[in-house]
């Protein structure tokens, strides 16, 4: 390395035969160090050779946080106490002093503080390389490989920086496109609303005109009825008149014949006069008849009028129906065109995103290579990777690697006895590793839960898990070995996060979640077991799929149909598709390491997802509030869960504020802090969500009741293709 500083002294592990130019190096180092005045003058031992101070001797080291290496398997104990009293060699002390001063002189507030901090360690390593002539090629190769790796990592970081800028640019472009689409849709909605108002006004005018015409028709019908009655009376009167005239004519004929018979010689003048009068009456009757035919020739009978009016109404209704069908078809045609356009745009966008992903994505790792290094070979690896994602595979590999490291560690370094150290880890010095298996750890943790629950049922008080954990270990293994078991169990729980028993105990022990969350999940599973056993009247241990589904709905009445179906599918993962009986007792079995089956895992996953959804609705109800008091939080809970009772509400409020009921009225808490505390506890929905009910009504029944006027507006408000298809149907 060009321009590096001279080493502050010689090495403590190289003999005089391996360093022929040691005296020259020593003189040069003494001169440089005395000139800089950073370390005291260098001196050789009394024997004139490099010191052979043991590596395990006591003394202060530079790296305070360095974890102890594994203890050698074979160590001589004859002169151990004597060797520990030997002081450090001067060269080692000079190197440590030089490193401390260089680190203290650095300005760690700069951007490249890590590179500056690495430079003194490089110089110390170079001093070792220069003085270890025998191992210099190997040490130089190691150093060069590290330098090449660091340079390669820097190049990769510089290459990834443009991708970050490109991601920001693409995000801004898509945001602008979304805003433009929203603005366009807003203009269309306003235009449709104006058109709707215009049509409503037109309909009102048509209704008024219709009412006016109906009044006129009623008036005309009344006048026509009166005229019809009047003419009918005249018709009957004319008939009576004609009958009277005929009767009078007959009487006159009879009288005339009688007179002719009596008086044979009648007066001809009289008869002529009577004939003229009769002819005049006939003429008048003929004129009156012609006038009536002329006046009422265009009048139709009431029977014909009613028949024509009914036919007209039927034709008008048929025309309206056909017009409505035509408008509906035209609207569906326009909507299908819009769907086609949006589908084409979405296809183009997806194609562009696919091309971007194909250019930027990294190749998938070949996970099969891991079977060569994982204990158990390919068979065990195949059983481990079944149904797991890449992220889960990475966690599993980290657990396997950590397992190997944990087995090789013989001791743990104590955390000290400070107040910030958990009570079950307060110890100074080294603690022996008990090297337990996963089965042993799970057995101990389950026994801790059993003892704690029994003690709480006996005393009626809830005890702290960290304190009970320590007292349990002290009672079972003694005070001397309690810390060894505590540290061993803690490291195993911290490592095996995929195991539910270990991860849940670790989260509660470290305070990440509340203990009531563990008891709440166990209570749900216990209630489900009791319900399934109650449905099994014949005590065969098996239920049909329908009985199993009904039992799930009885225990989980708030779950959606999709969630119930997921649980049913998880219960049938070992059954054939044609087999209908479900052995419900085997669903609650665990293996020797405490791992549950897919059914119990699905219940726990749904429990977490439902709680996250519940708190998300609560946060949305709180709006833009930064801080929240107890009254606002109560109101939000009642809004998202109207069926919640006062006792449960008080428990949730106390969980958020972590105080008693009488102290929550005056407290103000940040919203994020309240939600984090609720997430750590056992918070569940009590009644159905109002949002889910309104959503179901909108999807299944609301669209069918929409009128013709706001149908198109509803279609544009539909956010998913399923809703748009329901709207079209």
Image (cartoon, rainbow, N blue to C red):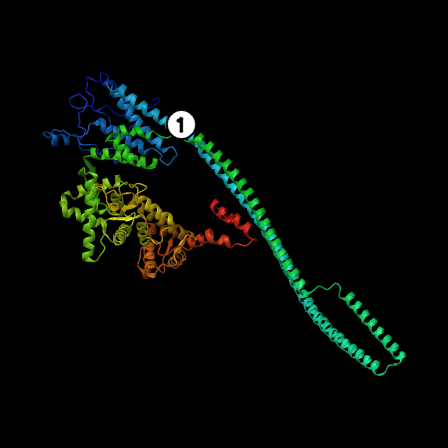
From the image, tell me which residue sits under label 1: 155
Q: Position of residue 627 (x, y in %)?
A: 40, 54
Above or below residue 661? Residue 271 is: below
Residue 482 visible in this rendered orientation of the protein: yes
Q: Splitting the image into 4 quarters, where does residue 43 fall?
A: top left
For the question of whether residue 681 can be seen, the reply is: no
Q: Is residue 368 left or right of residue 15?
A: right
Which residue sits at x=29%, y=23%? 142
When asked about the image quadrant of residue 226, the answer is bottom right
- Nearer to us in this view, 21 or 108: 108
Quadrant holding the N terminus: top left
State the SS at label 1.
helix
Residue 145 percent location from the top left of the image: 32, 23
Residue at point 50%, 53% (across, down): 704
Residue at far bottom of view: 262
**Left or right of 543 in this view: 352:** right
Whole-percent x, y for residue 367 in the image:
32, 30
Q: Position of residue 47 (x, y in %)?
A: 15, 22
The residue at 30%/28% (across/down) is 369
- Asked if residue 606 lies left or right of residue 537, the reply is right
Residue lying at the far right in this picture: please name it.
269
Dot 1: within a 10 Å radius of its alpha carbon, few (fewer than 14), some, or many (20 or more) residues? few
399 or 71, nearer to the observer: 399
Looking at the image, which residue is at 20% across and 27% down?
89
> Looking at the picture, does residue 231 appear above or below residue 469?
below
Rendered position, 120 above or below 182: above
Position of 398 relative to 605 (above/below): above
Which residue is more in the foreground, 414 or 41? 414
Foreground residue among 102 and 398: 398
- Count of numbered marks: 1
């Amino acid at each position: 390395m060009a321009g590096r500083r001279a080493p502050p002294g010689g090495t403590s592990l190289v003999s005089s035969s391996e360093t022929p130019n040691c005296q020259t190096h020593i003189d040069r180092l003494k001169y440089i160090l005395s000139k800089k005045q950073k370390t005291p003058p260098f001196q050789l031992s009394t024997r004139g050779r490099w010191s052979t101070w043991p590596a395990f001797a006591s003394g202060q080291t530079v790296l305070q946080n360095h974890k102890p290496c594994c203890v050698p398997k074979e160590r001589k104990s004859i002169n151990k106490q004597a060797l520990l009293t030997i002081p450090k060699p001067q060269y080692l002390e000079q190197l440590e002093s030089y490193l401390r001063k260089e680190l203290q002189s650095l300005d760690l507030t700069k951007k490249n503080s890590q590179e500056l901090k690495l430079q003194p360690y490089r110089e110390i390593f170079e001093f070792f390389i220069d003085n270890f002539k025998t191992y210099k090629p190997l040490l130089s190769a190691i150093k060069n490989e590290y330098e090449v790796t660091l340079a390669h990592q820097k190049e990769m970081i510089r290459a990834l920086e443009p991708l970050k800028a490109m991601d920001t640019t693409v995000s801004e472009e898509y945001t602008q496109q979304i805003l433009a689409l929203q603005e366009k849709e807003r203009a269309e909605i306003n235009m449709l609303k104006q058109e709707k108002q215009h049509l409503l006004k037109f309909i009102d005018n048509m209704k008024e005109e219709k009412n006016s015409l109906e009044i006129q028709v009623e008036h005309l019908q009344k006048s026509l009825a009166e005229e019809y009655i009047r003419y009918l009376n005249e018709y009957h009167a004319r008939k009576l008149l004609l009958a009277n005239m005929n009767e009078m004519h007959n009487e006159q004929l009879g009288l005339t014949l009688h007179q002719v018979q009596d008086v044979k010689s009648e007066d001809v003048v009289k008869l002529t006069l009577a004939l003229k009068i009769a002819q005049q009456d006939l003429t008048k009757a003929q004129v009156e008849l012609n006038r009536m035919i002329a006046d009422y020739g265009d009048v139709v009978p009431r029977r014909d009028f009613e028949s024509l009016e009914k036919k007209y109404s039927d034709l008008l209704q048929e025309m309206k129906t056909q017009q409505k069908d035509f408008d509906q078809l035209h609207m569906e045609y326009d909507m299908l065109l819009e769907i086609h356009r949006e589908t084409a745009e979405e296809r183009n966008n997806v194609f562009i995103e696919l091309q971007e992903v194909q250019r930027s994505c990294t190749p998938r790792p070949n996970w099969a290579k891991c079977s060569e290094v994982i204990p158990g070979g390919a068979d065990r690896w195949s059983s481990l990777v079944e149904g797991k994602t890449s992220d889960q595979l990475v966690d599993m590999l980290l657990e396997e690697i950590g397992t190997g490291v944990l087995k090789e560690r013989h001791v743990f370094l104590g955390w000290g006895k400070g107040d910030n150290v958990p009570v079950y880890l307060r110890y100074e010095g080294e603690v022996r590793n008990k090297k337990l298996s996963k089965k042993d750890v799970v057995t101990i943790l389950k026994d801790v839960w059993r003892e704690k629950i029994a003690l709480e049922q006996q005393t009626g008080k809830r005890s702290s898990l960290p304190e009970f954990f320590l007292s349990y270990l002290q009672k079972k293994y003694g005070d001397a070995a309690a810390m060894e078991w505590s540290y061993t169990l803690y490291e195993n729980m911290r490592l095996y996060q995929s195991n539910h028993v270990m991860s849940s105990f670790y989260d509660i022990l470290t305070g990440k979640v509340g203990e009531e969350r563990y008891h709440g999940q166990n209570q749900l599973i216990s209630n489900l077991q009791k319900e399934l056993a109650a449905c099994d009247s014949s005590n065969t241990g098996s239920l049909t799929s329908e009985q199993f589904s009904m039992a799930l709905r009885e225990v989980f009445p708030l779950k959606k149909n999709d969630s119930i179906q997921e649980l049913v599918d998880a219960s049938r993962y070992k059954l054939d598709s044609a087999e209908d009986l479900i052995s419900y007792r085997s669903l609650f079995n665990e293996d020797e390491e405490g791992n549950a089956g897919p059914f119990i895992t699905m219940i726990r996953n749904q429990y977490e997802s439902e709680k996250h959804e519940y708190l998300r609705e609560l946060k949305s109800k709180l709006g833009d509030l930064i801080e929240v008091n107890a009254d606002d939080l109560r109101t939000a809970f009642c809004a998202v869960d109207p069926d919640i009772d006062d006792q449960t509400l008080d428990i949730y409020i106390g969980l958020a504020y972590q105080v008693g009921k009488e102290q929550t009225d005056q407290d103000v808490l940040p919203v994020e802090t309240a939600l984090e505390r609720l997430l750590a506890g056992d918070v569940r929905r009590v009644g159905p969500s109002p949002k889910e009910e309104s959503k179901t009504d909108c999807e299944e029944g609301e669209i069918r009741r929409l009128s013709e006027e706001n149908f198109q507006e509803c279609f544009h408000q539909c956010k998913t293709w399923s809703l748009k298809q329901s709207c079209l149907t």
